[in-house]
Structure formats: structure tokens, C-alpha cells
Amino acid sequence: MTQAEIKLCSLLLQEHFGEIVEKIGVHLIRTGSQPLRVIAHDTGTSLDQVKKALCVLIQHNLVIYQVHKRGVVEYEAQCSRVLRMLRYPRYIYTAKTLYSDTGELIVEELLLNGKMTMSAVVKKVADRLTETMEDGKTMDYAEVSNTFMRLADTHFVQRCPWVPATENSDPGPLPPAPILVISEKDMYLVPKLSLIGKGKRRRSSDEDATGEPKAKRSKHSTDNKEPIPDDGIYWQANLDRFHQHFRDQAIVSAVANRMDQIFRSLPVGYNISKQVLDQYLTLLADDPLEFVGKSGDSGGGMYVINLHKALGSLATATLESVVQERFGSRCARIFRLVLQKKHLEQKQVEDFAMIPAKEAKDMLYKMLSGNFISLQEIPKTPDHAPSRTFYLYTVNILSAARMLLHRCYKSIANLIERRQFETKENKRLLEKSQRVEAIIASMQATGAEEAQLQEIEEMITAPERQQLETLKRNVNKLDASEIQVDETIFLLESYIESTMKRQ
Amino acid sequence: MAGNKGRGRAAYTFNIEAVGFSRGEKLPDVVLKPPPLFPDTDYKPVPLKAGEGEDYMLALKQELRETMKRMPYYIETPEEKQDIERYSKRYMKVYKEEWIPDWRRLPREMMPRKKCKKAGPKSEKAKDTSKGVSLTNTADVLKKIEELEKRGDGEKSDEENEEKEGGKEKSKEGDEEDDDDAAEQEEYDEEEQEEENDYINSYFEDGDDFGADSDDNMDEATY
């Protein structure tokens, strides 16, 4: 794992789980697989803290354990899974677009809790939905269950590996850790539950201000001895399935953009007859993007979508766009030229791009030092003398993509650090504004006069308000940037993964 | 060696024209320091995508951040001593729901072991008090005394202990008991070593709620 990735993981873990979990998590990412005591010793943390941190990390599928010889259990962190935390909003939003609010909350609960039983999810989501409904209305468990089943059917949620049921009555020596199993056919099998009930609305008496009674009540509810029907059957969000969906989305929208240009030159009218469809497919197949290929003539023509090529095109487009925005459109022209012609000499670049020599050289070297372009040496003589060697400029898409990906990780880490800095700088002001809001809220609840509310609001002066506005704007920008850089990360990672699989 | 024409005269070993400079031209200055931390960019960045989806995801992200901090998975660091102990702090603490992991899915060593907690994992072992265990207990007490004497490398001797015990023929339960005690002793040692002041910290640390019936009034330090 590169330093940039480790740094980013550290920031993510710290933001979501606190410093102790971050310390243990980052240590495991750096050092690889380790047993419990070594972790405690190397990080200088108490055994108790390490255990808690590991429990949290395992719960969230960020760390796995393995039993080694002599009963030693070793823990290993999944760095790439930690990085997926950046994508949580995108997973949840996608669930919303596909399965509306119910689906959205199911996926959100699963991501927030790592793994849950179906009955727990259904209950929690029903409660949450009921909160948002009109007075008197409640959400039925059956409806939530339905959506859950649909999510399982389409593989967006899957079962976690489970403890195999042991039939032997003879206990024997207990293993140091349960060996969890998983079987392909059972992974999306929803247990037969008859969950009957409705969501419960939280009464206004237990707001966060008087948190104590709520905590007491929740403890009592966990004490009640209702047997959980699907005890031990845990579910998690299936991130790979979401990735598949994103990838399909990306390809479809890329093609749509392409088709748009062609649409405009075609007559209006949406009755797509067989002939026209045929034409479109041929167009797509002949398109230099090579997303669609013709793989035979059976049934009037078999068309196949070339995923790897599609991902490659998307990655290339990303690279082109970055070059353009960073170095300018003339540089971008050179870049596209070299991409197209694969290998070009210095002189050829100048000629083809129609850019004067000095400028062309300058641009080429800028891109070269940015690692977007690389030099290929082709010696004419066996002694590799520089004066008798061809130097060709070329774009190695895989390595440029890797370089850009690495840059993306660094960017997000910078964005997060800046956001945390901005928030910390204004901590006092933020706390003050939160207190004022809380006071206003409680006063409104007890029916205060307009004048009194005004007075309280004035506790925050106009320049302070300005400051808060600026802060909010900046934090929003930084957050939005994080989300969008993650989109680029997704594209590049998909391409790199697809390329590595083929090798 | 062949090729050093003109002693002392600068000569390039390659064709300078290939790199883009004509002969005799003034070469650019040598760079003596790293590039600036925030270099000026020639081009302004492209504005962010704006739209319903993006707005929703932004709101989601910020909400999730806040929610995560309130979940039981967020482990607070024990706070450093503040300059003034604020009375109000005791009453403004956020009450977090407890989270108890499913122990059946985790390695056995994950379960917290505390002598003082009566209910909890220890009770399962309590029923296993056989003669064998009491024997090992005595041996263990002796070992403990030994180790307390050489407290310098408390942890090291623990590990040595474990290796010795691993080699001996013992029942799994017995092994675990020793691991238990060793673990407790290690914790005890560490706690003692951490104590640099005169305050007797409350025996129950804040947040140690795993598997125990915690008092709601635990936040008040007990002296």
C-alpha cells in the first residue's frame, strides 16, 4: 500500500471510528497480519483497547482474522475496503434511486453497522420511516421486508460468512476462533421470517437533550427475552454489485453522449424499427470507441459489449480531461495525438500538431515530468549512444492511470485535512451557534415570544454570521470535491483491475 | 580515455540539439530548491458538478459523518486532564447506546476478561473448576510472584510464560485460564505502570461497557 493510501485510510478511520481504532487499523495496514499481543505491544496500546478496536473493525468488515498453527489467531486489515468508506453516500443514493426511501435506509443501516440481522434491519428502518410519516401513520414491517428481499434478489445485499452449525454433541476442545464459511448458493437466501409489526414513533419526551431516559429504555429493550428468529444470520451490503451498477451507468452515459451527437443529425421521430436499430448497432460497432463489437451473425447479428475496452476508453477520457485542465488545450491536442499514433518522435509531434518546435518541446516536457507521457528508447546501434537512438513519445495508459489514481488519493487526503482544519479553526464559533440553535429550539417548544427569539438570535453578531456562512460554503465545497474525486477513483480503479485480470 | 577532446573544455556526451537547445545558447538556471508548496496554476479548476443527485449525496455525507460519531463504534479517546474541571461536563455527556458484538463470530481471545465483573464471560469458566485448574492456579501464583519481582520486562516474561505453557501438556481450558491470568496480569502491570500520579483512577474505565451491566452513574469518578 502506498503512503498516500495509508494516509487516506488513517483519516477515514479516524473520522468514523476515533483515534484508537485508527491507530490499530493503520498499524495493521502497515505491518500486515499480526496476532493480538504483538499489536498491543507494537502500538503501545492496552490489550483491552486493542480488543475493542478489533471488534469494531471486524464488525465493519475492515479486518479479518485467520487461525494459524498452534492456535495463534492473526488479524489482517483490508486497506481497499477502508477506502470504500468514501463511497458510502454514493451507495446509499443509488439504493434510493433504485428502491426509494426504504431501500435507501436499509443500505444506510447496513453500511453504518457493518453487519446486521434482517429482523434488526427491518425493525430499525420501519422505526426511522415512521418518524418521517404523518402523525398516526406507521410503516409496516412487511413492506420493509419486501424491499429487503428485493435487494437480496438483485444481490445488492448479501449474507456474511456464517458459523457452520455443528451437529456433534460432544463439545471437545473449542477452537480459538470460529471458522466462518460461505457458500455461493446460500449467499442471497433470505430466511423465512414472518416479521409482523409496525414502526414505532419515538415520543417527543425523549429528545437528545434529556438523553438519559433514552439510554435506560434502550437497555431495557435489549433485556427483553424475545428470541430473535434469524439469530446468527447476518447481512452486509454487497459493494461489488454496486460497482457493477456504477460501471454500467458510466458506460451507458458515455455511449448516450456519443449517440447524442449522431441523434442530432438524424430525423426526428422515435419509432425505432428493426432496420433503424440495426443501423444504430452498426454505428456503435464501427465507432472508434469500440464499446460494442459484432461477434457473429446468428439471429441477425450478435453484438457484444466489450467491457474492458469501454473501461479503457473511460480511463483515457479521464486522462485527456486532466491534461486539458492542467496544461491547456494545446497540450491536450498533443496528448491526444500521441495517444492516437501510439509512438511519435519529437519532430513528428511538431509537424502533426502544427505547434512551433519550442512550444511543443516545452509542453512535451511538462507532460513528461507529470508522468502523463513517457519516453521510449529505440537504439540504432548496440552501444545505445544517445546521438544514435530514437526517442519516441508514447502514452502508457496503465501507468498513467496508476499515477493519476495515486494523485487522487493524495487529493482526497488534502481535502479532508483542509476541511478538518477549517472546522477546527472555527470550533468556538460553531459551538456557540449550536448552543444558540438549541436554545432557540427549546424556547420555541415552550412557546416563546418573537421578541425573545430575536434577542437570542442576536447573540450571534453579523460578522460572525458571515463567518459561519463562509465556513459552511467552504466545507460544502470540500465535501463535494471529495465525492467527485471518488468518482474518478472508481473509474481508474475499475480500468486497472480489468487490465490486471487479463494479464 | 578516447573522446576527451580539449582538456578542460565543456563537451556534451550527447547531441544537445536532440533535447531542444541550440549550441552555445544559455541554458536555463539550475534549480536549487524544491518546487513551491502551492504553485500558481495557469488554469482555473473546472467548477464542481451541481445537481440534485450531487446535492443529496453531499447532505448524506455530512449527516453520516455526524451519525457515525454518535454510534457505539466510535471509540472516544480518554480525554486529557482539562485546565478547569467543568461541573457542567458531567451532565452534558452524550449517552451512547451499548454495542455488544456477537461473540460466536469472533476469536475467543476477543472477549474482555475482568476479574471484578461477576456476570459475563467469566461465569462460563467458573463452572469448569476442576482439580486440574486449581493446580495450575498455584503454579501460576508462583509465577506471578516471580514476575512481579522482575517487573522491568513484565510483558516479555509473559510471552516467555506462554511459550512454556504452550509446550506443556494441558487441557485447552487450563491453557485458557493461564492466558487469562497472564492477560490480566499484563493489563494490571500496564495500568500500574501508567499511574504516574496520586489519583486512584476509578476501577471502571469510562466506556468499558462490554458485556457488563454498567451503572448509569458510572461517569462519576469513584474515589
Image (cartoon, rainbow, N blue to C red):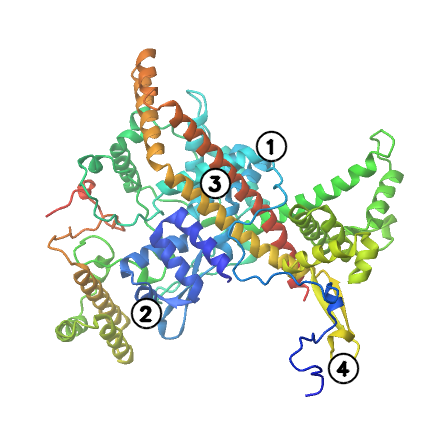
| Pointer 3 chain | A
Relative to residue A460, is residue B69 depicted above or below?
below
Between marks 2 and 3 in the image, the one whose residue lies nearer the viewer: 3
Q: Are marks 4 and 2 in contact (CB under 8 Å)?
A: no
Q: Which mark is residue A140?
A: none
For marks 4 and 3 on the same chain, the one whose residue lies earlier in the sequence: 3
Q: Secondary structure at mark 2?
A: loop
Q: Are marks 2 and 3 in contact (CB under 8 Å)?
A: no
Q: Position of residue A368 (x, y in %)?
A: 67, 60
Q: Share a chain, discs 4 and 3?
A: yes
Between marks 1 and 4 in the image, the one whose residue lies nearer the viewer: 4
Left or right of A419? Residue B156 is: left
Which residue is labeled 4 in the image?
A: A382
- Residue farthest to the right, as pictured: A275
Q: Secondary structure at mark 1?
A: loop
Which residue is labeled 2 in the image?
A: A173
Quarter of the picture containing the C terminus of chain A is bottom right
| Pointer 2 chain | A
Left or right of A172? Residue B124 is: left
Query: Does residue A233 appear in this view?
Result: no
Q: Nearer the viewer, residue A81 or A402?
A: A402
Q: Nearer the viewer, residue B7 or A49?
A: B7
Which residue is labeled 3 in the image?
A: A108
Q: Are marks 1 and 3 in contact (CB under 8 Å)?
A: no
Which residue is labeled 1 in the image?
A: B51
Amino acid type at image mark 4: Pro
Between marks 2 and 1 in the image, the one whose residue lies nearer the viewer: 1
